[in-house]
Image (spheres, grey):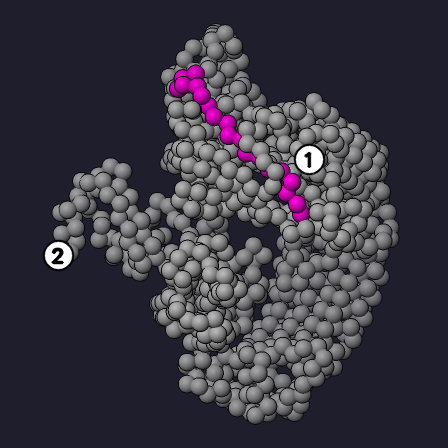
Amino acid sequence: MGIEWIKERIEGKKVLIVLDDVDQVKQLQALVGIRFGQGSRVIATTRDEQILTQLGVHKKYKVEELNNWESLRLFSHHAFKKGHLTDDYKDLSIRAVEYAGGIPLALEVLGCFLNGMSVFEWKSELEKLQSFPHEDIQNILRLSFKSLDYYAKKTFLDIACFFIGMDKEYAIRILHGCGFFPYIDLSLLIQRSLMTIDVQNKLRMHDLIRDMGRDIVCEMSLGDLGQLSRLWFHEDVLNVLRNEKGLKAVEGLTLNLPALEDVQLKTKAFAKMKNLRLLEINGASLIGCYKHLSKELRWLCWLKCPLKVLPQDFHLENLVVLDMQYSSVEQIWKDDRVLNKLKVLNLSYSKNLTKSPNFLRVPHLELLILEGCINLVELHESIGHLKGLVLLNLNGCKNFKKLPRSIYTLKTLERLNLSGCLKLDKLPEKFENMTSSKELVIHRTAIKQLPSSFGLSMNIKGGSLPGCKGQFLESQFSSFSSWISPKNINPISLLRASVFRFGNLGRLGLSNCSFSEDEILNDIGSLSSLQGLDLSENNFRKLPDCVSSLPKLQYLYLEKCKSLLSISELPANVEALNASGCPKLKTLSISRSSQLASLHLTDCCNLDEIEDLRLDPDLFINLFDSYNLSRKFRTRLLQCPPTQCNICHRVILLPCVPGEEGGIPSWFSHQRIGSSISFHVPSPAEGAIRVLLICIVYAKQKELDLPMKESYMPMTEIKVMIHNKKRDHRQVLLPSLFLYSVSMSDHLLLFRWPVVKNKVVVLGSPDKIIEFVEKVEMEVSFELCSWVEVKKCGVHIVVDESKTGSSGVLAVMDTTVDDQHVIVPNIKWMRQSLTMHEFIAQVCDIWVKVKVGYVETGEACEEWRTRHMYSLFIEGKCWRGHSPQTTAVCDQKECRELGTVERLEISWLLHTSTSLVQFWLFNTIVSL
């Protein structure tokens, strides 16, 4: 009855429908069959992202937490019935906002709850909230928890009590060992907004959601500490263990004792905890028979364990992860122990460990981490029986002498770190059998020659050679050390004998090898898969010729090459170049076909020119403390963009020239002393807004006496805010994503944003849009570290005053398409400027940026890819044959001057080794 009534009144009309808190697919399916008018929109909010995925919605937007300013404003509206703070309550309001953590519901409930209370009552209630979360807030948050199944609920409670901040893969191994389904459940928790995974692959959870989970655990115990399924609070844990209150209900317990606190606990206290799965007792000593500990243990984390060997009566048969870093063990267990389920063994920094265990009875071990075990001499020969070993980390085992010959049988081993094994002088033969190896680190070893078979059939993707400091390795659960130490041998001869074998090498670190240009091997040019190369701190005077022949090279590091005079012939695919700290570098030449997007040339005090630098693509240029730049180059770098410019982002950092008044380019229409500036949005009659440019001049505050080295200060974050004064709405235009250098000298930082249809996209958040409304006053402000002074700032808006169809070629498509081409209408240019052939040749040098969706290992992911235009259609005629390596091919008979083109059609071809499921056009730029 209800849906029919709605259908009758809205069918055929242009409507906006908002469905709040959708928790079932059928609630949205009820709209199927209704014919909405053109331009209608349906917005649905839900805690369960899977509902939107099942329905195949057009676009999803994740609602983020409010920033501090927005949080204070919303909280004040409910706490004081006005949009600003009351002075007497300012500090308390900030505490309340910190507790709510940017969640609008929590801010609203908390504000209403505290409204009308005295300062004393505020203090009392805020202290109470730290131990007893507000019931109304908790009831709303629990809706997502209640919809979970049995195993997902247990996974959520384990994370809330024990695993926040833990590596995702590490946690998955533990949870899987408990009989849970972590791959499915973690995805579900993320979809329900109950947790997140950060950029470092760590599990994260909002404080209020964490407190909600822990509150549920407390309620289930009915106030009896011994009945708590999970114990995490320091005082509660000590109370339960000292008074032997723990019962069968306890599944997990964590205790992290301060370094100076010596606590001895009786093993008998664990006797009744028959279901204990998770145990962390860092820094504690256990007294008594270990048979009292649960047979159900899956995770044992015992840092600084005082035992010399684990007792025979300690039940370890179900253990999945054993983490005993900084322990006193000399031998981890006797040879006859069977640990059939153990997958992770971490004994790092156990200085008394002299030998590894016999691995015959731990057949499923995947991660073996022995970093910093300085008295470890060798590994047991049985390591060859670990058919599933993925990581072996011996970093910093300075007395380690020999790898067992059986190690070559480890076909699953992906990462081998031998850095700092100072007495290791050779690798075993038959290394070619290790076909899964991706990363090998043998820096700071005594190895002078690789095995003759090394690299022939291996899949090495990254590595470091003896005598070099460079690295391109990723860590897993235990960070590999930074490779900074005195050289012990010259790696040149080793390279000559070995480099040709690394056909699949993706990253190579050769920094601080004292190479001159004559010593860099031409064989490096044969590394056709190389994507990253670090040649920093070497002695060559020009870029070695072999570098220019690397077809896939994307990242090139030449930092602190003190003798480097010039850089030329960069591979076209290089996206990032860092040549900072090269004091003799004078010239840098970049080809017109370069894809360079990031250029770091800080402290290049002799650099005066960057030849052929393209300023039309997205570009980040850092010229901090490079004071010798020519006036001609500075003028070109800081020129006002034309009204019909390409759509791109740009960031430029360079020193102000002494004597330049203010430092901000004179053509900036709005300039002001201080850290904020206002402007009015032009009306449509004045033209379409094309580009927003903002800049600041900043330096260290001279009156602050902070520790520094050679006049340099630590890096500073910079946040750019934009304030719509009419709506009183603030939005972050540039988040604090990057760090910028600071010195006593003035530096100019210029940001450029493209404006499409009077809208600007927040950097790093494509779903966040800032709209410019005509005549509205906007304020731009800058937030830097407290010890940095913003001396002056400026804003300039580039407006296209021309009418539709004026000379020049510029087209931007910002709509989603579901085909491999896009039609760009109304293209026109000067008849006398170019022939048809010249036009095709130049237009075909366009790049299109495409957002590509992939399916890999069963999980959907997205990434940005940039590809050359594949073919061009003009007036219905297809001009084919274009590729990244060739220019456009056209029949000479068709060369003629071109007038107005009514339709320009562009298509492209994507090449990928993975399954392409869908793609969207992000933007297409045609520019001459």
Residue drawn at point x = 54 percent, y = 78 percent? 232
| Mark 2 vs mark 1: in front | 1
Question: What is the three-letter code of the residue carrying label 2?
Answer: Met
Q: Residue at the spot x=24%, y=43% of the render?
A: 15
State the residue position of label 2: 1
Of the 4 image quadrants, the one containing the N terminus is bottom left
Q: Give above or below for 221 relative to 56.
A: below
**Amino acid beneath label 1:** Leu
Q: Residue 171 at what x, y percent from top left?
A: 55, 67
- Which residue corresponds to the image point at 56% horizontal and 58% vertical from the top-left? 201
Across and down, in percent, residue 740 comes to 66, 44
Q: Is residue 70 left or right of residue 578?
A: left
Secondary structure beneath disc 1?
Answer: strand
Q: Position of residue 809 (x, y in %)?
A: 47, 20
Does the magenta stretch mainly form a helix, a strand or a loop? strand
Image position of 607 with respect to 166: above or below: above
Is the residue marked by circle 1 packed among few (<14), some (14-19), or many (20+) residues within 10 Å? many
- Secondary structure of the residue carrying numbered label 2: loop
Q: Residues within 10 Å of mark 2 (few under 14, many from 20)?
A: few
State the extent of the magenta-drawn residues as a range: 788-806
Q: Residue furthest right?
A: 489
Disc with the residue nearer the chain's start (2 vs 1) = 2
Q: Residue at x 65, y 57 (%)?
A: 475
Q: Is residue 248 visible?
A: no
415 magenta-colored: no
Residue pointed to by mark 1: 654
* Residue in front for this viewpoint, 691 or 42: 691
The image shows residue 713, relative to residue 120, as above or below, that is above
Q: In this orientation, does residue 116 appear?
A: yes
